[in-house]
Amino acid sequence: MRIRRVLTLAGVVALVAAAAAVLVTLGRAALTPSSVAAAPAVTDSTWPYYSPAPAESGSPPPAARPGRTATASAVPAVSPAPFVQHFADGPTAGPQPMRRSPTAPLKVPAFVDGCDHNYGTRTQCVPLAFPDGVTGAAGKCSWLAAHGFTGLIVAGRDVQGLDADGDGTACD
Amino acid sequence: MSSGGTVLIAYRNRPWLSRADRGRIAQALILVLIAATAAVVPAGAARASANLIANPGLEGLDPTGFPVCWERSGWGDQSFTFGLASPGHTGANAIRVTLTTSPNGDRKAMMLENPSCAPNVTPGHRYDLSAWYTTTTANTVMTMFRHDVAQGWVYWTDLATLPVTSTWTRKTVRTPEVPAGTDQIVWGVTIYGVGTLQTDDYEMNDATQPAPEQSCSAGDACTRGVWQVLPFNSPVRAIHAVVLKNGNVLLVAGSGNDPDAFAAGTFTTAVYRPETGTFSNVPTPADLFCSGHVQLADGRVLIMGGNKDYPAADGSHGYKGLKNSYVFDPATGSYSRVNDMTAGSWYPSATIMGNGDVIALGGLGEDSSGTVATQYFKTSESRWLSLNEANQTWNFWGLYPSMILMQDGRLFYTGSHVFGNGLPGTGSSIYDYDANTITPVGGLQNKDQRDQSMSVLLPPAQDQKVLTIGGGNIDSNPDANRLTDLIDLKRADPAYTAGPPLPTGTLTGGVPQTSTQGKMYVSAVLLPDGKVFETGGGLHNRADPVYEASMYDPATNTFTPGLATDPVPRTYHSSAFLLPDGRVMSVGDNPGNGSFDMRLSIYSPPYLFHGARPQILHISENEWAYGSTHTITVDDPILRAELIRPGAVTHSSDPNQRFVDLPMSVNGDTIGLNLTSNPNIAPPGWYMLFVVGTNGVPSVARWVHVG
């Protein structure tokens, strides 16, 4: 019985040792992810409030290692340069041709806001183009009424023919 | 002897191992196999403590003598060397990278981008990455790439700048949530300045926290949010809205599109205090209606241009732009004048650059002509440069062109603009102020119907993606559209691609929109949970409000339709913006009949109904330099932290709106927040710092100053 137990124990030990050896080899050779358990509490020694745990990662404190200079506390604060990626640097389109300094103003329509300022106060907006399906003086006046336009003066010319009676008020 | 012989015989007749022995050995074998399997199989959340890095200690070397599963990586024209340092932080080896010249580019030892070396990841998970390092240059940064199942290996993001240290130092940073479609990542420490970097003992652990059970008892508000129309009106026509560094809101009307006020010289501004629901009137020195505005690096607001005149009824002239410029100081609640711009500016854009200067483009001049000058405000001198001092392209950028600062300092013209057709060509482009070039960008759908669409730099700014939503055309006045366009400015040759269609809503009287009807006058607001809330809008030129709101999720490129809609119509001259408490405020509406809606609305997004808000209990300091790490303490675990630049919006245009992710170094409730080293990602200024709890609920913002 004793021999059996000894043999059994030896067999188990040998197997565990072999498995451990395999794992260590794998970890060293790094052909697979390591099975070394991470420290559960993640730390960051660059924090202002960092105080290193003595047993962290199982390594001796840096200052105790031979051949190292330990001057971290004297490191001056240095600003990093901006880290810029080289994105969007291969356009297939070339740049537009350079323009010359203009010799005349760039004309923009007076009614740039899409409003026909021939009508209404200058803050009102009778559309230069009415939505699809709104046509003719009747259609436009109906649309304007439905949108709260009242007492719509003709401030300029009646270019859209909304003042049929010519009294200076459109759609009345 | 006999007994001994009997024993021997008996022993020979029995199996070498008894049944019990075999059982024990089998048990031991199973245990060993389980341990071995657990050790070698990459694990997800189920094994949160497993280091997922292959060859983390760099001890296994390939035939070239370089660590197995690692490669020499980088780009540029440096003089550089890769090698091993011995001893390492632990063990025999560390990787040493030395740059002796560094005119551009970077170098880094990276995990091999192949299936057996690159760590496997699970979409939606977050990972703590750590490495030990020494570096002689502050130009050192942790960088990640991800393997997208559709695109292959692509840049993901930079996590943290590593300070100079001559002693082995450990840096740990948590990744953002792994994007959908990602199956592996690689990462490393990058050096991009002259110096020497050593790294060793890499580690990567799944840090995914289980989401708490969601509970919400607020009914519809749980999924749709809720609007409240405030019981008081704005004292001014809120055409321009700027969130100030103290949390108050600057509401600028000028003449407010009211010719009577213009004729009387009555120009108005008010400061709204959300905490008390009160207003202060601000003496307003000129007609700042139609101006541009942007927060400067110190939190004051630069106002440029405005309205010199309304158009003549006979069309003899159009709107005229002022050259005046002012700075509004939140501390004194007053305007002070700076020198005039070089040209009149009615509807100019204003974008703050990484150096804190401001570039204004487009608009109308003092004679109603198009302003073609590039106008440059030099903040350090508090003045507009003269025409010859600034680089000039003489290009007309239209009105309120949406010019978004890219990570390399160029400006992306999104194609979103105000009034009429888009610019000639493709309708969007990249403008390089330094090189004085404009390069077309393709892909924008229907560029002549993106009038009063809205563009946003999507969260996070590091991703360099822009979304352009909706639009119409006040000249041809078609039904506004449902188009959305997405562009990834990380690509070598970026081009817009079509996004999902904007959800439809209802028109006046509850009439459902047709399947082709969308909206212009769109407001899009970046929220602290990383989504984009879009609200308001109209179908036609200053007419036909659309009642529709939805939530766009950049992570999934989808709109969640059916959110609660603002009861107040929000068309022309409407805006929406984020308040520091995580709610959204909506102002203004100026339909064609000339009326102006003075009501104010507040939207509480669904996240405010899903449990307790995390609290930022302490911030180590509120002056943040680029590339620095700052410590906060929170009362509960958090998922993410970010900076959101306060709104400065008018006419669906706020090119400076941005959400800057702050990769976290987590140690319980103490969190290190790592700010980018790149000012083009987070231009200098005051930002709202939010954290988001594991329940998805954001905190109330604290204010920090960047730069």
Image (spheres, coloured by chain):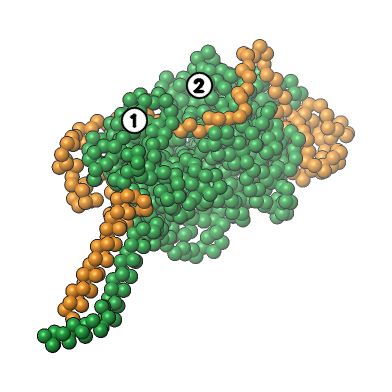
At 20% from the left and 84% from the top, the residue drawn is B9
For disc 1, the chain is B
Amino acid type of disc 2? Asp
For disc 2, the chain is B
In the rendered image, what is the letter of the chain coloured green?
A: B
Image coordinates of residue B38 in percent, x first then y, are: 35, 62
Residue B434, numbered label: 2
Along the viewing direction, whichever of B514 and B177 lies nearer the viewer: B177
Amino acid type of disc 1? Thr
Residue A27 position (above or below residue B290): below
Report whether residue B108 is seen: yes
Quarter of the image that includes the N terminus of chain B: bottom left
Image coordinates of residue B63 in percent, x first then y, are: 35, 41
Residue B81, numbered label: 1
Could you tell me which secondary element the residue under label 2 belongs to?
A: loop
At 33% from the left and 62% from the top, the residue drawn is B36
Neighbourhood count class around disc 2 (C-alpha, 10 Å): few under 14, some 14–19, many 20 upward? few
In the rendered image, what is the letter of the chain coloured orange?
A: A
